[in-house]
Image (tube, rainbow, N blue to C red):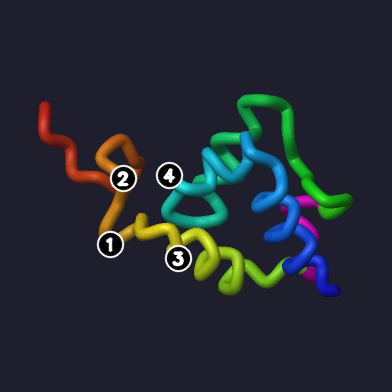
Amino acid sequence: MTKTERLINRIKEKESFFDVAFLCEDFETFEIEVAEWGVDHAGGVDFDDPEVDREQMDSFFASFGCTPENPHPCSKYADPIFA
């Protein structure tokens, strides 16, 4: 199993990670959100490990429906509606 697959599996297994992942457009957004909890790794894999396939991770997060092109309304990617 690759490090990327281990990360994805751990996110699916841990309810709090999965709940956050469901709202994230990409891996970077997930990293930022869970960093607030002091988390910088999962499944024994550091988020910044060079062996992590960031493109595959972004595809995993996009599978939930939110993407940078179709962001969650509270996302950093969303158009500000109350400017």
Question: Quadrant of the rendered structure where residue 9 is?
Answer: bottom right
Instruction: State which region is magenta.
Output: 46-51
- Disc 2 marks which residue? 72
Residue at 67%, 50% in the rendered image: 11
Residue at 82%, 73% in the rendered image: 2
Pick out the residue farthest to the right.
44
Q: In this view, does 82 lie to the left or right of 12?
A: left
Dominant secondary structure, magenta: loop
Above-or-below relation of 55 to 32? below
Magenta segment includes 50: yes
The CA distance from mark 4 to mark 1 is 14 Å
Q: Which of marks 1 and 3 is nearer the N terminus?
A: 3
Q: Is mark 4 on a helix, strand or loop?
A: helix
State the quadrant of the N terminus.
Answer: bottom right
Q: What element carries label 3?
A: loop
- Disc 4 marks which residue? 23
Q: Earlier in the sequence, mark 2 or mark 3?
A: 3
Residue at 59%, 45% in the rendered image: 18
Type of the residue with mark 3: Ser
The CA distance from mark 4 to mark 3 is 11 Å
Q: Is residue 66 left or right of residue 45?
A: left
Residue at 79%, 70% in the rendered image: 51
Tell me if mark 3 has few (under 14), some (14-19) or many (20+) residues whose alpha carbon lies within 10 angstroms of its own: few
Question: Quadrant of the rendered structure where residue 79 is?
Answer: top left
Front position among marks 1 and 3: 3
Question: Quadrant of the rendered structure where residue 27 is?
Answer: bottom right
- Residues tagged 2 and 4 counted as in contact (Cβ below 8 A): yes
Q: Which of marks 4 and 1 is nearer the N terminus?
A: 4
Label placed on residue 21: none
- Residues tagged 4 and 1 counted as in contact (Cβ below 8 A): no
Type of the residue with mark 2: His
- Disc 1 marks which residue? 69
